Image (tube, rainbow, N blue to C red):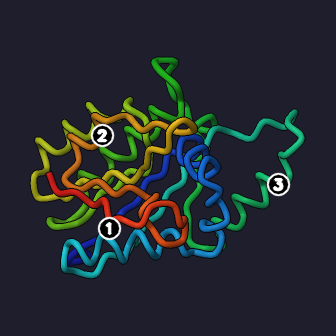
Amino acid sequence: MRFEQFDCLIVDGPNFWSLLKACGGVQSLFDGDLVAQMEERLGSFLRRQVHFDERIWVSPNLNHLRCNTNWLKRFFKTLQTHGWTIVFPKQLAIPNVEKADDYTIKCLLWDRAEVLPSGSILALASGDGDFVETLHSIKSQREDLLIVVITGTLPPRFYANPKLREVADFFLDIFTLPCLLLKPSVKLLRR
C-alpha cells in the first residue's frame, strides 16, 4: 500500500538523549509534547500536516552492569507504548567497520530513503557529524524527499555539528520548542 506521504523520524538515541538531558527536557519524550511540537513546527513551515508515521529510536544494547538498567528498560518500554520502534544495534550482525549504532542509523536512513514516497520527510534527530555524508548522498539521489535534521546547540553543554545544518533541507532547533522553554525565537531554516 502506497501512501501519499509517509514521514519517518530516526533518532540517534545516545546523542539525542544527551541533548535532552542538557536542557532538562527528557520528560517531554514521555508525555509526547516534544514530538507533537516538532511535527507542528515543521507542518506550519511546510504548510502541510506532518506526522511521523514511523518513529525509530536507535540505542546501544543495555549494559547490565550499570545501576540504571531497570530505569532504561522502563524508558524503552514507555517509548514502545507511544508507538516507537526500538533498535539495539548489537543484536544485529554488523561487521566491525564502525560503531554499531552509527552503522545501523546509516542503514536505516538508506532503507527508508529507498521506499518513502515523493514529498515525504526523512528526519534524523542527532547532532552527530557522522551522518553528514550519508544525508548528502541520500539527498543527491532522492531530491524528492525532504531531509530534516532535528537537533540543537546549547553551549557549553551540547554542541551539534554545524555541517548537519548545511546538508538538511530543513533544520529544526529543538530549543525553540515551547515544551523546552529555552529560546523564544523560531529557528527553522530552509536551505
Q: Earlier in the sequence, mark 3 or mark 1?
A: 1
Above or below — where is 169 with respect to 40? Answer: above
Q: Determine whether, in the image, residue 39 is placed left or right of residue 29.
A: left
Work out how far the residue at label 1 is from the one at label 2, CA to CA, in angstroms: 19 Å
- In this rendering, is residue 37 above or below 86? below
Residue 148 x/y as whole percent: 29, 55
Mark 3 sits on what residue? 71
Q: Residue 111: percent from the left, percent from the top?
A: 33, 48
Q: Which residue is mark 2?
A: 164
Residue of label 1: 7
For numbered disc 2, what is the local secondary structure? Answer: helix
Q: Which circle, 3 or 1, is nearer the viewer?
A: 3
The foreground one among 108 and 159 is: 159
Mark in the foreground, 2 or 3: 2
- Specify the quadrant of the image occupied by residue 160: top left
Q: Nearer the viewer, mark 1 or mark 2?
A: 2
